[in-house]
Image: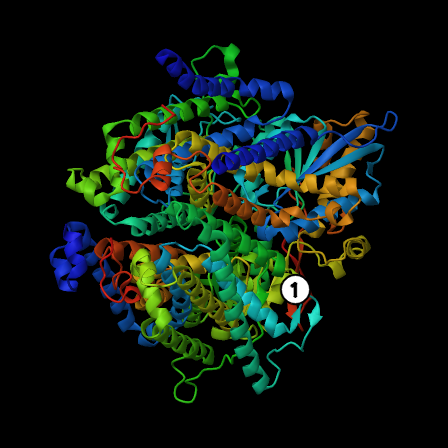
Amino acid sequence: MSMVEAKQGGLLDSVRSSSWQSRIAVAVVAVLVVVLLFQAAQDPAQFVSQLLVGITNGAIIALIALGYTLVYGIVELINFAHGDNFMLGSFVGLTVLSGTFLGLGFFAPIGGDSGAALQIVGVVFALVAAMAICGLINVGIERIAYKPLRNAPRLAVLITAIGMSFILQNIGLVWKGASQIPFPSLIPDGNALGAFTDALVYRWKDLFIILVTIPLLLALSYFVQRTKQGKAMRAVAQDKEAAAMMGINVDRTIAVTFLLGGILAGAAGVMFGLFNGTTVFNVGFRQGLFAFTAAVLGGIGNLTGAVVGGILIGVIGAMSDQYVGVRWTEIMIFTVLILVLVFRPQGLLGDRSSVQGGGGERT
Amino acid sequence: MRGDARLNKLALPVGLILLALVFPFVDDALGTNLTFSAIVVAVFVMLALGLNIVVGFAGLLDLGFVAFYALGAYVVGWLASSHFQQVSFSFLSAANTTTVSGVEKPGIHISFWIILILAGAFAALCGVIIGAPTLRLRGDYLAIVTLGFGEIIPQFFENGNNIFGFNLTNGVVGIKAIDSPGFPFLPDALDDWQRFTTSNLNPWYFTILALVLITIFVNIRLRDSRLGRAWIAVREDETAAAAMGINLVTTKLWAYALGAVFGGLAGAFYGAFIKSIFPTSFSFNVSILILCMVILGGMGNIYGVILGAIVLQGINFYLLPQVNEWVHAIGDATGSALLAEADIPRYNFFLFGLLLVIMMLLRPEGIIPNRQRAEELHGGEEEDASVPEVSRAG
Amino acid sequence: MSRRRRKMGMLAVLGIASALMIAGCGGGGQGEGEEGGDQPTVTIVSDLPLQGSSRPQNETIVNAIKLALEQRDNMAGDVRVNYTSQDNATAQAGQWDEAKCAENAQTAAQDEEIVAWIGPFNSGCAAVEIPILNEAGLGMVSPANTLLGLTKPSPDPTEPDKYYPTGERNYLRVIPADDKQGRAGALWLDDEGVESVFIIDDRQVYGQGLADQFEQNAEELGIEVLGREGIDGTASNYRSLMTRIADEQPDAIYYGGITQNNAGQLIRDKVSIVGDNEEVIFMGPDGIFEEAFLEAAGESAEGAYVTFGGLPPEKLSEEGQAFVEEYRDTYGGDVEAYTAYGYEAANVVLDAIERAYDENGEVTREGVLEQLFATEDYEGVLGTWSFDEDGDTTLTELSGQRIEGGEFTFDRTIDISE
């Protein structure tokens, strides 16, 4: 079938062998891009501002998307609880910064008026705590709700994942209440480019997101590509039984994967809170949905794909807010998703290639 | 012997149908007020059976089934209410076409029974339009595309109050005061059947019961048909099925369209029953709930899916609201202030999730598993999967 | 062996659960109040969403109704009143559910003990319930529905008649409808010399309806409307929207919506990108007139304008202030935006029951409904007001607040009758 060839060939080949649906999809995407560029030319400053907003929002989505894609790559499960784990991450960060837990005050709340050094320590401490706790939560969820069902029908695990998502959401609701809760403003809101230009606004907050995201991505990439455990992950993703025969501890490898996903979710949670300034118990649902979409858009199981997908969704969102209308943004995002998948059924960058160590084909 | 076995096989379904037929009268006699919930549960049974065709029979994970439910509901909203004020058109409608003050009602008012057919057809058409370009996707890519449509369609209804100035869906406010169904030609003695009222739920109940029975019948017939076997083949191994000469896209498209029909019918009934439709009623949550019903009950098994729908809606509508009272009663009885004043509704979502997890851990194949699927799991994996299913439900 | 045992266990669990369910259903709803002599006993119910994110708000309404009853020792004059709080939300939806609304209405319609209905909270739910209860002749008093078309003609010509199949009215509300608050907002902005405004709503029935009314009034007053957008209440932030609004350079931004749809995030991004609230006014309705908004918005809330369909607690009559204090003493927490309306609704209903009994010697739905509409010059916590023939409050004095030092500060009374 043409689809199989398309997966192996490059972009040109896939166009050549594509069906009429794909060509329509490409045409629609092309028209959208042209219209967008035409709009951009009329007010370049506005376009660039929106692009920057989109990239920053996309970076957070990308971090969450990585958790989906890691887990999917290895156990083929859409981990619905992941978005809610991200929400708990932001709550953990908030609790750390407040210095109070279970009614016990450990230290004074770290807020906007604390000293600069204390603020930096606070941010780092909040990030580390959230990463550790969310990582453990994710491992715990895997142990309780997914591992016993490893040989059950694939969709059974989907339901326990949904169940866990409800449970985590309710924990968040009981923990912090139903309203949006504020995060202390520890990252300055001023313009990082203020020294150079006034026309363009790039805040320290935006810079912060990028400065935390890039090292995390590099570390993850290093871990998956270079370490022994990373190799084991790739082996298990490719073939569990063969990996087990080679002496790889499959259970442990899967647990490590969930740990990594949770760590990223925790980091994303704290960054989300510090960046936006508020968080709420059901924030994981929408963010999780977008992140999962991003993972699929980039090619599920593909780490680079998740990042590209996340940033793309952020940018599409910002452009749609500017040029189409906020109320149509979600429709735009999902329309692009569908068009991309019709054109490239395996996602933009092909699925599972980096976790599996190359090759987009999956059966 | 053989006759006895056949009789035994029929005994359960016949017994259940009889039970369903007398249910509203028993409910009335006992004063338990369960008929309303039974109707809502029945709507979800229909939805679950519709989704079962897609997920259970053909093995296509559909995360956006709510789209068809919404489409069906909006069809009844468009064709049986005063929504389109620009026109005034009635056709065999059971509802009063004049207002209390005697003015003719604006809008389109068509007989509910015709709308029911239109809603099913419209949902099927949309299923084909959505499915045709996307069904060649495999596995979870298809799932995410259905999720995309499941998000787009309710959003579209939400924003549809101003499509280039035209009010198609009335936006978030929704379409309200939808006409009641009925049989206007019946004698006056049966006035509750002439035009269904909110005070007598029996006509509603028997209508949805008939719809559910039709759905079950079609499900059974489909499962045992040539198409049904093709679905199973596709579900078990796409490549092998294609090699055997099954047209994958057409086969999947049939599953998608037929599933959509029942989604549309359920939506149309629900819209007429509640008399109002809101885009917010068709969120992703509902897709997930229906999917849970199918998987929890036992994918592919008709009894299982029905039971799944009843159990989950029962938990949602009855068990969880009751838990609060039980805990308070226990607290009062034992003198524990903690229990007596516990605020259980706060934890309902938690309990719902916990029940899902526990039930799935206890019965991974569903409450009543599909026998063939169970064999695949517990028997040898080499078993020929395309052997037609012989099920107890026949 | 083990599979069979598990199966049995599961069946047993299900069996017990269903048995309990039936027992629970059968047991509920029986009158538990002691019958004292020939004292007539009636029941009133409230119908509010008690799950998900609107729970805290609605819990205070339930508390306020209980408080109103306690203050009268559960008596409306010579009539003993039982109260049942119904929940119209489901766990799965996490919010009000139209099927649950219809079911509650349906069940109540058949229970002759019930003579009055307080609620619902959501206008959509009201649209489902009114026709059902209309046929049952049960009077409803809502503390929170503001959708104009429920009682008065709206741009949809079939409203409000389509909600009342019998042609008789049975629905009243103690909260001013959208037209009043929308007008109050526009008048206030006009007074401040605003020439252009950008309107945002939260794409819900309440927020969108209010924004519609505001838009209409703003245009009538000659304020230029630069744009209108509907936000997603679960979005992570609104920075791209605000970047766009900043480009339009409006004098003011009007938000029609509630706190829970991310109003705190909205105003944070507004201050960060468009400018502070002195530079570009931010105005919102009573949906953000609550502590939760101040908390979520933090310092960004400073200087924001908030309209309210009544007078704030410290400007209320003595009665109103007494209510706020008593509420605090009884339930600990603070009152929310709709709590006072819940209290007012309960008192109006109880007074109507009392008068219905005094007049007719018995309490019927018909009698209570008649007395509800007869409520005149009622001196309650919101001020002195009556119901008009559509069941709307006659209050024309709304209040404007500004946020100063992290608190709502009364700024002015806005009289919309002019």
Label 1's element?
A: strand
Does any portion of residue B111 appear in the rendered image?
Answer: no
Image location of residue B191, percent across then percent down: 51, 15
C350 and C165: which is toward the camera:
C350
Image location of residue B17, percent across then percent down: 46, 19
Quadrant containing the C terminus of chain C in the rendered view:
bottom right
Q: Residue at x 21, y 42 (%)?
A: B249
The image quarter containing residue A295 is bottom left
Image location of residue A77, percent across then percent down: 38, 54
Residue projecting furthest to the bottom: A195
Q: From this view, report whether residue B167 is shown above or below residue A13.
A: above
The subunit carrying tag 1 is C
Q: Residue at x 75, y 45 (%)?
A: B340
Q: Amino acid at mark 1?
A: Gln
Does any portion of residue C170 appear in the rendered image?
Answer: yes
Q: Which residue is mark 1?
A: C401
Residue projecting furthest to the right: C37
